[in-house]
Image (cartoon, rainbow, N blue to C red):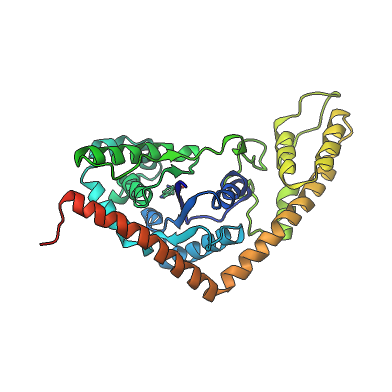
Amino acid sequence: METVVSGIRSTGNLHLGNYFGALRNFTRMQHENNCYFFIADYHSLTTHPTPGNLYGNVRQVLSEYLACGIDPDVATIYLQSDVPEVTELYLLLNMIAYKGELERTTTFKEKVRNQPGNVNAGLLTYPVLMAADIIIHKAHRVPVGKDQEPHLEITRKFARRFNTMYKTECFPEPEAYNFGEKLVKIPGLDGSGKMGKTEGNGIFLSDGDNTIRKKVMRAVTDSGPAKPNQEVAEPINNLFTIMQFVSEPATLKHFKEQYARCTIRYGDLKKQLAEDLVKFVAPIRERIEDITADSGYLRRVVKKGKEKARESAAATISEVREIIGFRPF
Ligand code: TRP
């Protein structure tokens, strides 16, 4: 059985793109792998959240993951800040991580461009902490999106470097988890591109029924097909794509046929899509609300996750300390 590690950003609520693109896969793969999922709360400090926001976001994201089907009795789900071994490994890896290579990381350069007023050392060493997260459990696979590939590449480099430097095979070189044909991209409601955090473009798992309806009714469309059987324009095709995930196949077929015949009424399409989205999201939202309100449950989940994660992390750290030369007298 392979070990899989994935960190979860604790900023921003989850939207349908996160659900179909990642979460749904997490809930499936937890049964086939030894999975560690954690909330990357230390990583979120690079943008200096207030204590209240930090706590609220962690609680929300944890509840959302649980509501979507991550099972704490199957996978290990924990908070990064609950596992001090991670920070120890981070410190140790910092000694073999070079300033130049960190500065050249594309994600870092992007941050420097976007937030020139807050280029802190945590931002520079973000990939080192991420590498520690991953190799602390000797992970084989990491399910990450395209944007995280540079970080995974650097993680592989650090694992290799450590092994070479100390003539050991302590760390496997983790690879990206390939979802194969299951890899999906959910478009946004703004006519082009994929669903993101931008207000108006995404449907969040915590959105209320009327919020969903309003967002869908505001979705970008066009003036309609000009002639029969023409290629479906992007904004409409995006709505069809979302429909494919939440509606009955017959519903999608119906609207596609109407489009081809130029008889489609976008108002009807949107009304149907809105109701199907409501039907899909409402049970998840209700579970999220139940879970966030249940402090006892959350406390038990976090405690159990911490114990399981620390057991694995402590084993790695004691091996690493021995390898490096921190030995008992
Ligand atoms: N950087 C990741 C993101 O922004 C989150 C993350 C932190 C992560 N540590 C990780 C992902 C370890 C995978 C493995 O999405």
Q: Quadrant of residue 231?
A: top right
Please state the horizontal and vertical placement of residue 40, each as a whole percent of the image: 42, 55
Viewer-nearest residue: 137 or 211 = 137
Judge left or right: residue 62 versus residue 113: right
Quadrant where the C terminus is found in the figure:
bottom left
In screen coordinates, is 128 left or right of 289?
left
Work out whether 304 lies above or below 162: below
Q: Residue 9, position in %: x, y?
A: 47, 53
Residue 110 in view (yes/no): no
Query: Does residue 259 sit above or below 296 in this rendering?
Result: above
* Residue at the image position 38 percent from the left and 45 percent from the top: 115
Residue in the picture at 39% in, 36% down: 150
Query: Measured from the top left, where is residue 64 in percent x and y?
Result: 57, 60
Q: How many marks?
A: 0
- Residue 61: image location, x then y, percent: 53, 59
Tell me: 292 left or right of 6.
right
Q: Residue furthest front?
A: 1
